[in-house]
Every structure is written in C-alpha cells, then in structure tokens.
Amino acid sequence: MKLFTGVVGAAVVAIPMLFSTAAVADGAALYKSKGCAGCHKADAMGQVGPRLAGQMEKYVLEQFKLIRDGKRASGKSGMMKGAVSKVTDAEAAEIAKYVSGL
C-alpha cells in the first residue's frame, strides 16, 4: 500500500511538471517566433519596449490583451498593437508564463 501511495504521489507531482515544462518551452518558442525580442530583447529585459522578465504573469497577460484589443493606448502600445494583433489568448498566456519566469 505504501508503494502504491508513493507512486501515485510522485505521479501527482510529476505530471503537472511535464505539462508546465512544455508550456515554458512553447512560451520561449512563441516569444521568439512572434518577434517579441525585437523590442524587449532576447532576455526580455527591455530595450524599445519595457522589461517583461520577472513581471507577474497575470499582469503581463492582462496588459498584452488590453493593447491587442485596443483598450490601452499609452507609451508605445500603438507599435505593439500591430505586432500582437494576431496572437491568440492561448499564445499570449504561454508568452506571459515564459517571461514571468525569467
């Protein structure tokens, strides 16, 4: 019984980690393929655009959507709106997860 409990407990911990690792990898690939590094640098520390590295995931995602959907028009958001106009909510979430972990 203890062996079974240990195996189940390990699976409960390991399976979400497998998915979250894949999500981070996808977020990194999306960050690169969507051109984010052009303004935010490869390390997301900011250049033309602000630093994204280490920002709270929820905040990054919210700002991303506000800019994309035309509900935020401050700073250089006009430039970003064009760059993110075709990024889906799921893609934006993966990018936000990635940069928040940097």
Image (cartoon, rainbow, N blue to C red):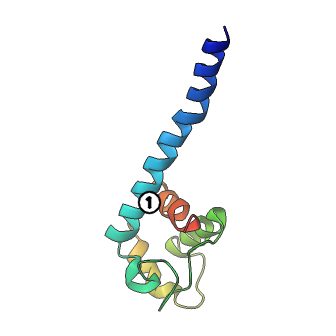
- Foreground pick, 73 / 42: 42
The residue that appears at 58% across and 20% down in the rendered structure is 7
Work out which residue is located at the far top of the displayed protein and give it.
Answer: 1
- Foreground pick, 29 / 69: 29
Q: Quadrant of the C terminus?
A: bottom right
- Foreground pick, 50 / 8: 8
Question: Does residue 15 sit above or below 94 in this rendering?
Answer: above
Quadrant hosting residue 29: bottom left
Relative horizontal placement of residue 88, taking residue 102 as reference (left or right):
left
Q: Quadrant of the N terminus?
A: top right
Q: Secondary structure at mark 1?
A: helix
Q: Name the spot of residue 68 as percent of width and height, x first.
A: 50, 72
- Foreground pick, 93 / 97: 97
Question: Does residue 42 sit above or below 26 in this rendering?
Answer: below
The residue that appears at 43% across and 85% down in the rendered structure is 39
Q: Name the spot of residue 47 as percent of width and height, x first.
A: 48, 90
Q: How many marks?
A: 1
Q: Name the spot of residue 36 as percent of width and height, x first.
A: 41, 76
Quadrant hosting residue 3: top right
Q: Name the spot of residue 56 as percent of width and height, x first.
A: 66, 67
Question: Does residue 27 sit above or below 16 in this rendering?
Answer: below
Work out which residue is located at the far left of the displayed protein and give it.
Answer: 33
The residue that appears at 41% across and 55% down in the rendered structure is 25
Work out which residue is located at the far front of the displayed protein and give it.
Answer: 3
The three-letter code of the residue at mark 1 reads: Gly
The residue that appears at 41% across and 71% down in the rendered structure is 85
Q: Is disc 1 surrounded by few (<14), some (14 to 19) or many (20+) residues within 10 Å?
A: many
Q: Which residue is mark 1?
A: 27
Quadrant hosting residue 83: bottom left
